[in-house]
Image: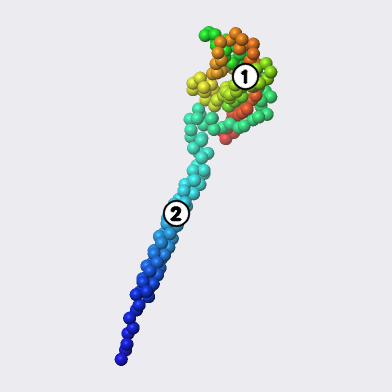
Amino acid sequence: MNVQKRMSPFTALFIGIFGVGAMAIAGASCIVLLGMRIADNRITDVLHLADDTIEGLPELINSLPPAIGDVLNDRRAPEYAADLDVDVAFAVDESGRLRPVMTIKNNGSEVVSMLAVRVAALLDNGMPVREWTEVVATPIAIENEWRGPLMPNATRHVVLSRCYGHAGKILSNLTPAHEISEVRVWQQDDTSG
């Protein structure tokens, strides 16, 4: 005769809890592994797309209209700042307000596609009261803020956007100071050769 022992309630509870826990761990592991596989496939697709885009970039740049393609064809040239004469002065406009005016002369043989000048208004003691950056040459000319490239041997006169109260006493107290903070020159595409 075969006698079967009954399981105690604590044993049944223990087996039940650990059985459900084991099933939850197995299910979660399957979900994590499936998620990792999907993520790997997506990342691989994105990397292939990036590779294809980078490989096709020269063709894309060559197919752009010249006005847009030339924007991408320049180089940073801090040494070219020596070929630029920049002068900043304060002038009184028609409403009697003080405005900074800048004159830039390109003495070199390169086309300046980007020129940013840092301007400061100084008191007699050299203390700055205002400072800002003006972009006086841009790759393309669109509006007042996009003035276009500065050609070789060209002179550009720019009335800057800042205004200061009425001239009178202020004019005698302010002195302009400037520094060239960014110079980029256009480089001709040599692939047309």
Residue 157 in sight: no
Mark 2 residue type: Ala
Quadrant location of residue 23? bottom left
Residue 146 in sight: yes
Q: Secondary structure at mark 1?
A: strand
Counting from the top left corner in percent of width and height, residue 46 is at 46, 48
Counting from the top left corner in percent of width and height, residue 32 is at 43, 59
Mark 1 residue type: Ala
* Location of residue 181 with respect to 169 vertically, above or below: below
Distance in Å between CA atoms under marks 2 and 1: 55 Å
Looking at marks 2 and 1 on the same chain, the residue that comes earlier in the sequence is marked by 2
Observer-nearest residue: 126 or 39?
A: 126
Residue 36 is tagged as none
Measuring 37% from the left and 67% from the top, which residue is drawn there?
Answer: 20
Residue 121 is tagged as 1
Measuring 43% from the left and 60% from the top, which residue is drawn there?
Answer: 33
Observer-nearest residue: 94 or 189?
A: 94
* Location of residue 149 with respect to 57 vertically, above or below: above
Number of residues whose C-alpha sits closer than 10 Å to that of mark 1, classed few (under 14), some (14–19) or many (20 or more): many
Residue 39 is tagged as 2
Report the number of numbered marks. Answer: 2
Number of residues whose C-alpha sits closer than 10 Å to that of mark 2, classed few (under 14), some (14–19) or many (20 or more): few
Q: Secondary structure at mark 2?
A: helix
Q: Quadrant of the N terminus?
A: bottom left
Specify whether 145 is left or right of 86.
Answer: left
Measuring 60% from the left and 17% from the top, which residue is drawn there?
Answer: 102
Q: Quadrant of the C terminus?
A: top right
Model colouring = rainbow
Residue lying farthest left?
1
Specify whether 188 is left or right of 12.
Answer: right
Observer-nearest residue: 2 or 96?
A: 2
